[in-house]
Structures are given as structure tokens and as C-alpha cells.
Amino acid sequence: MPKDSTFKRRLKNVGPGAIVAAAIIGPGTVTTASNVGAEFGYALIWALVFSVIATMFLQEMVTRLGVITRKDLSTILREQFSNPILKWLTILLIISAIVIGSAAYEAGNIVGGALGMVAITGLPTKLVAVLIGVLAGILLWIGQYKVIERVFVGLILIMTLSFVITAIVVQPDLSAIFTKGFVPKVSSGNTLYVISLIGTTIVPYTLFLQSSTVQERFEGEEQLSDSRFDVLLTMAICGIISVSIIITAAAAFPLGTSIQDPSLMAEQLQPLLGSWAKYVFAIGIFAAGISSAMTAPLAAAYATAGAL
């Protein structure tokens, strides 16, 4: 088969990775990356690159697990123990960690998405948050994997265009990015930010999500290479989006600035890029919020179903 047709086939099969990428790039990632750029400029890009590479390895492992065994991570963990006490402790641990953790993520995802839409429309935050929750619920209630997958692919494209275009237009210092951003340095002042970048990129519930969703798209060992391509491409896009946010924040704020609300980024960009920039960045924040608002409950459902 010609290489170009193989590449096209693999592009068409991109899907499970996009769902995981949408889960990773949420309001928490946007806020953390914005803070890192505003506080330290380009200095911690290396930590993000490390996180993305580590995520690629982890997601590729659970991809193989799902594609080859046709079992999700929860099922595999449950089946490792013959002792009923250990088995039920494992089940309880999975359900409590993933379900409670996803519920905690969900609040931040919905509010984060609402902040992006509020910056565009001026509607009350509570009203927009309710609308996002209802919209996410409807899409999940439909329950058709292909519909959900297409929605996530679209949201990832929106985030990529929004954040990458903004980063390009701010005209960053490319030489500074490479000379300062890829030199690993850890100090007492940036340790928490390094941990935060790793924590918002390596998201545990996405391991359960990936091992389940790959079974919907890929049918066996013969499609393993396509599933790997899906993971590597989408995780690379994750990194590009997050680095773009760091670069934009470094250009928009003086060093040492602390950002509590990611929608401030949209407002701060107006003097630099004009009124349109506010809307482009705010759309990216909204897409990050609503995409993560769907992936957290989806992961909790897959993890619970597999554990039980």
C-alpha cells in the first residue's frame, strides 16, 4: 500500500486519542500554562515537553492493552486478584479514585468553559455553566461513540487553531524559546509549577478512558500501528497547544504575574492583537472546558463499568 494512502487511512482513524487530548487540555491546563508563562516566561517549556513524552508512553501502553486484549484497564486490574478481599478493595479503590476525582474535575471544567463563553457573550456565569452541563449531558446521553468522537475531534481542532494562531500572532522571540525553554532548571521558586505542569498533562483517568475507547475504533492487532499513530499525533497536538498558551502568556504579561482566571488572558491580549484576539482565545477556553466536561464523566463511566 502506498505511503500516502496509509497516512490518509491513519488520519481517518484518529479518534480515541482526540478524546484523551480533549480531556487533558481543560481549564486546569489553560490556567496552569498561563501562569507558567506569566511567571517564568519560556523557562519551563522543558517540563511540559517531558510531561507530553511521558504521557505518550503511558497512553501507548494502555492502547496496546485495549487493542490486543479487548479489555479496559479496570477489568485487567480487577482480574489480577483471585482473593475476593483484594479484588473488592481494588474495585473500591478504582471507583472511589476515578469517580470522585472526575466529579472534582467536572466542577472546574464546567466553570472554566463558562468563563470562556462569558468573555464572548457577557452572559451570567451560572447560566452558561448550567447550559454547558446540560449540553455535555445530552451528548453523553446520546451514547453513540462516532458522534462523541467527531465532537471531540472538532473541539481539538478549535483549540489548536485558537491557541496556536494567538501564539503566532504575538510574535514571540524564537531564539529565546529554544535557548531558555529547553534547558531543564528546577529551583525552590518553580518546583510547584513543574509539578503542576506534569499533573495537568499526565491525568490518571485518561488511562482508563484510552483503554476503553480504542476498542470502539480499533479491532485488533492488525490495527495496532494505526492506534499508535493516533496516540502519538494527538499527544503531540496536546503539547503544541499547551506550549502555545505558555508562549502567549509570556508575551502578554510581565514576568512574575500571577493569573487566577484564564479569561484574563483573553482581555490582556486585546492591546497586543486587537479586539478579535479576545474572542479567539476565549473560544479556545470554552472548547477546553466543554470538552473536558464530557470526558470526565465518560472516563468515570468506563472505569466503573469495567471495575464491576
Image (spheres, rainbow, N blue to C red):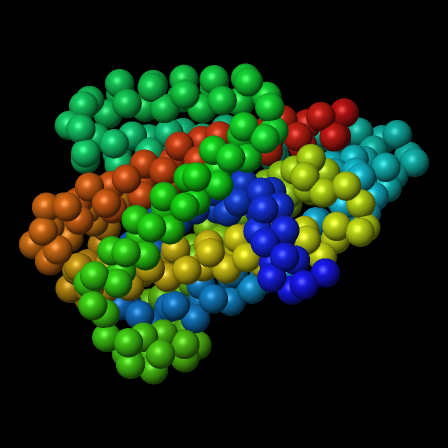
Is any atom of residue 188 visible in this view? no
Is any atom of residue 103 visible in this view? yes
Task: Estimate the x, y position of residue 271 in percent, counting from the top left.
Answer: 7, 54
Q: Residue lying farthest right?
A: 82
Foreground residue among 6 and 118 = 6
Q: Is residue 133 left or right of residue 226?
A: left
Say which residue appears at 76% left-offset and 45% top-offset: 67
Say which residue appears at 50% left-offset and 60% top-offset: 236
| For residue 142, above or below residue 180 | above
Quadrant position of residue 182:
bottom left
| For residue 145, above or below residue 236 | above
| Viewport quadrant of the C terminus | top right
Say which residue appears at 53% left-offset and 30% top-offset: 148
Foreground residue among 16 and 239 = 16
Task: Estimate the x, y position of residue 254 in percent, counting from the top left.
Answer: 15, 64
Task: Estimate the x, y position of residue 235 in percent, counting from the top left.
Answer: 53, 55
| Viewport quadrant of the N terminus | bottom right
Quadrant position of residue 84:
top right
| For residue 101, above or below residue 202 | above
Say which residue appears at 32% left-offset and 36% top-offset: 286
